[in-house]
Structure formats: structure tokens, C-alpha cells
Amino acid sequence: MSSPEVPVSEQPRQVSIYENVLQAWTELDLPALQKKLDDQGLELKQDQKLSLTTRKELAQKTRDFKKLEDAQKLELFNLLLKLYQNQIDEMASKNKKAESYFFGFYRFMAEAPDPRPLLELSLDAVMELTEAESLRTQVADLTNELAKKADYDVLKQRLLRNEQKAAELMASKLKAQEDEFRALIDEKEKNWQNIKEHHDSQIESYKSTVNELKTSQEVATLQLSSHNSQIEDGQASAGVLAEIGLLTRESETWKKRVFDLERRNEALRRELSTAQAGSDIDSMKEDYEKKLAEMESENVLLMANLKQVRKNADASVMDHESKLQSISRELLQAAKEIKSLKLKLESTSDYDDIKSELQMLRQIEFGEGSTTGDQPDDSIDSLMEKRNKELTNTLAEYRAEHETLIETNTKLQADLQSSIAEIERLKTLSVKLEADLASVQDASNGGFNDTASLVSNMTRLTRNSQFGAPGIDEASILPIITKQRDRFREKNKELEDDLRKHFNMISDLKRKNKQLQTDNEELYEKTRYMAAIKTNESASQRNKTFQPKANIQDLENPYQTRYESKLHPIEQFRLQEQERVNSRLSPLERLFIFLTRSVLATRATRMIFLAYCLLLHIVVMYTTIHSAHLQTLLIPEVGMRQSTGGNTGSAPGALAKPPK
């Protein structure tokens, strides 16, 4: 049972809902959350076990406490009360921990959408997809079979038409054969009649010729008898025989010609009969109709195949669109991952700097341990790796300690400022309190003064008791003020002690900070020294290992300035004098000095300038040699032209022949 089709306008909204749900659950990271919940559950389970054991112990101690006497109960009451308080504190902390775990889980799951309807829809979609796949295969098979049998109606009509045409053709062929045989029989009879007449005429002619031959024979016999002695008789008989041979040959040729004419006449009569019957036209028409039917059936098959191909193309287009949507979603996910990776890469952008620092530290260690140069390379590498690890660990510890010291320093400074402000406030309060005490004492000795006290209840008491006994008020307020003064003094002493401790801690931190600065300066000097050595050894490796980055320069600026300030002061004076002398030079001279310094600054610029000079000299030498070679080639050519001109002038005289 298939669900109703979703409208086209609803599909993007559902896709966006699915994408939002997928994004929410991706951000939720359910496996990590499950792992975290497992850890928290194990921790809570362990806490439950511990609390159960502690509660059992507490219950046992309570039962033991109940069995004791009253005097012992008074002694152990505070201990038992403390145990109960500890148990209550532990339970409160566990409750707080469970609440934090719950709210942490709730923070993740509060915004998560309900996956049940989407999972139900996905299950329905999967089931419908399987049904749709089976139905799609059935539809494809049926469409293929239908495409193969698309010309069924055409074939049926063609079969009926062919049966009718076959019956008509059979009748027409029978009629044509009958007409043909009838015409052939008529022609045969006519030919036989003509042959009979011809034979009769030939018989008559033969009879006449026989009579003539008899007469000629008689005449010939007479002539032979009369002319036996003459030679012409033999010649006459030979001429007669030759005439007879010619006549016989002519008769044979005429017989053959007549026979051929009869055969041709019969063929023409047959063709005439067939033409009259129209069998050839019908056969041609039938052939054309067969071809037309075949073309129609092929056309129907091609149309069915075309429809099938269009359906397949539409299905492939839909598949490609779905694949494109999935690829676009994957691209968006990949873009988000790339963005996160870029952020991670930006957070680890100082990898090259740390690597260069590590290489410097390795080189420093190698320079310090150069006495073991005869050991194999593996031991050196292992020592360098160990030393590198130690230095990295110490560097990390120093950095962490430095950061913690800076933080503690800032905190202590803030505490110091707050304590100083508190001391000032307390001083002002103590001054006010002393003034108030003095005013109260004056009021108790000489009378009441309503405006002498700062405390509101005191003013109200003095106002209400103007006509009462002043000794009672003085006795009631002086102990309170003295206790408050004592508390202030104790608080001042505590604050002074804390301030003294803070000052000591700040001085220790400053001393440690100075020590770290000196250590960093020494390390910077070592790195500068190793960088200079490495620069002299190989420029390429120097550019790869000790080339300073921007952030390294920013970090090393204070150490660099301190390092340069520690140099000899004459060097600074020499640089200042050199700058003063250069400022007096002309612009061309300063430009020349700048160019020479830039050329001679590094090994690469020096090599480039040397290569440029060599190339320039090679070009100049090549041009001079080439011009000289061209000049040497041109001079002999002129001489050869002159010599060839003389030869051409003398050639006619040399080749001319002398006159005879």
C-alpha cells in the first residue's frame, strides 16, 4: 500500500526539515554523548557504593552511640554530629553533581528534535522504496515486453490483409496461368497449322522440283552423252552440285529462322497474355505492400522503443537529480568540515615555528655534545631525540609556569590593589570611629550632643534620653565600640600580614621572571649563534631551517633588542657614524652603495651577479668573434667574384675555334 504522493511544493520543506534534524543530531554527537553518560553513570554508581558503605558505617556508629551512657554520649556527640554533617555535605555534593550531569544532558537534549516521526517516515519510505523497486522492475519488464509486442495490431491487420491478398493472388495466378496456357495452345495450334500448310506447299514445290530435276536429268544425260569427250561436262556437273549445296544451306538457314521466329512468337504471346492478366503488376504491388507493412511495423517498434528510451532517460534524470542533491549535501558537509579543519589549521599555524625551534634546539644539543662525534649516527639521533624531548618538556613547563606566574602576578596585584583600597577604607573608618568615640566621650562628660554620633540608633538614644542618666548609655555603647575597634585592629593586622605575604610573593615572582628572562636571553644567544653557524655552512638549509617568520620576529623582538643592546657600544657608535657619513653623500653615490650592498649582501645575490657578469662577457666575446668571422668570410668572396669575372672575359677566346 503506497502512501499519497507528496506535492512538489512540500518536498523542499521536508528536505529542509530533514537537513535541520540531521544537523541537530550531528552537533549532538550521540556516540560521544553516550560515552560521556557511561562515564558519568559509572561515576555515580561508584558514588552510590561509597555512600552506601559510609551510611552503613554511620548507622553502625549511631547504634553504638545509642548504646553508650550519657557521659560518653556527651563526649562523642560532636564527633557523630560532624560525621552527619560530612555525610550531608557529601550527599549535597553528589546531588549537585547529579544535577550538573542532568542539566548537562538536558542542555544537549532540550534542543534536539523528536526523531520518532522522522524515523517512522523513513521506515515508511524504506518500505515504499522496496515496494517501488519491485513495482519498478515489474513495470520495466512489462514495458519492455509491451515494446517488443507493440506491432501486434499491425501484424494482425497485415495477416488478414495478406490472407485476402493471397486468396486474390491465387485466383489471379490461376486465371493468368489458364489464359497463358490457352494462349499457348492457340499459338501452338496456329503454328502447327502454319507448319502444316508450309509443309504442304513444300511438298508441292518438292514435287515440282522433282519433275524439273527429272527433266533436267534427262537433259543432262543427253548432254553427257553428247559431250563425253569434252572437259566442260565435268565442270557443268560441278556447278550444278554447287548450286544444289547452296540451295540446301539456304533452306536450312530458313528453317532455323522460322523455328526462332516461332519461339519468339510464342514468348511474345505468353508475355501478352501475362500482361493482359496483370500478374506482374499485382506481384509488384504485393512486394511494395509487404515492404510498406514491414516499414510500418518497424516504425511502431521504433516508436515503442523511443517511448521506453524516454522513460529510461527521465528515470536517469531523476536519479541524477537525487544523486546531485545528495552530492550537494555532502559538499555542504565537506565545506563545514573544511571550515572546521581550517580553523584547526589556523590554531596550529605555528607548527613550522615550533618545528624550527625544535631543530634549533637539536642543533644546540648537537653542538654541546660534539665530543661524541665518533659514535654512530643512530646513537646521535637517539641522543638528539631524547634531548629534544627533554627540552620540549622543559620549555612547555617553563611556558606553563611563566603563564601561571603571570596570572598569579596579575591576581596578586589585583588583590594588592583591593587590599590597599580596603586598608584605606578601614583607616578612614577607624579615624571616623575615633572621632565618634571622642565626641561620645565629650558628650558623656559635658552633656549630650545629638550630632556627634554617626550611628542612627545612638542618635535616637541620645534624643530620647536627653533628660536621663548619661552613664547608662555610655556604659552600654563603649564595650561595643571597643570590641569593634579590637576587631578592626585584628583585621588590620591580618591584612598587613596578607599584604606582607603578597609583597614577598610578588618579589619572588619578579625574581623568577627575571631568571626566566635571563634564561630566554641565553637561549636566544645560543639560537643566534647556531643560526649564524648554519648560515655559513649552507644557504639553502639556512633558508629552510632558520629563516625567520613574522611571528618569531614578534616574539624575539624584546630578546633581540636586549641582545643587541648588550653588544659593544663602539659598534653602535660606528653604525651611527656610518649613517651620518652616508647621509652627506650624493644620491648617485648612495644609490651605488645601496646597489653594492644589496649585491654583496647574501651568497645568492653574489652568485647571481657573478653569473650576470660572466654571461655579459660571453655575449660580448661571442659578438666580437662572430663579427670578425663575418668580416673574414666577406673578404675572400669579393676576390673570388673578381677572379670569376676575369675568367668569364677570357672564356670566349679560349673556347673559340680557329678559322679555317
Image (cartoon, grey):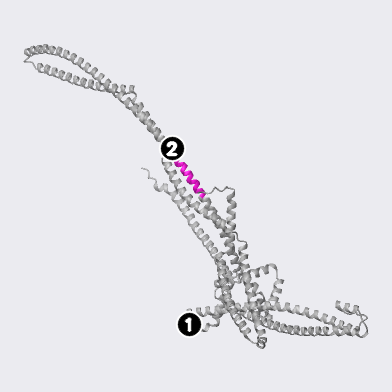
The image quarter containing residue 187 is top left
Q: Position of residue 646 (x, y in %)?
A: 45, 51
Secondary structure under tag 2 reads helix
Sequence order check, earlier mark of 2 and 1: 2
Residue to which mark 2 is pinned = 300
- Which residue does the numbered mark 1 point to in the structure image? 375
Counting other residues with Cα less than 10 Å from the Cα at mark 2, is it few (<14), some (14-19), or many (20 or more)? Answer: some
- In terms of secondary structure, what is the magenta stretch mainly? helix
Is any part of residue 312 visible from this angle?
Answer: yes
Residues at marks 2 and 1, CA–CA distance in whole angstroms: 91 Å
Residue 417 falls left or right of residue 278: right
Tell me the quarter of the picture where residue 406 sits: bottom right
Q: Nearer the viewer, residue 232 or 316?
A: 316
Quarter of the figure with the C terminus = top left
Q: Name the spot of residue 457 as percent of width and height, x first.
A: 86, 77
Give the x, y percent position of residue 149. 41, 40
Q: Say whether residue 304 is magenta.
A: yes
Give the vertical position of 483 relative to 210 (above or below).
below
* Residue 532 visible from this viewpoint: no
Q: Amino acid at mark 2?
A: Val
**Left or right of 628, for residue 282:** left
- Could you tell me residue 152's position as x and y percent? 41, 37
Residue type at the position of mark 1? Gln
Q: Is residue 93 left or right of residue 162?
A: right
Asked whether 345 or 63 is in front, the reply is: 63
Number of residues whose C-alpha sits closer than 10 Å to that of mark 1, classed few (under 14), some (14–19) or many (20 or more) = few
Mark 2 or 1: the one toward you: 2
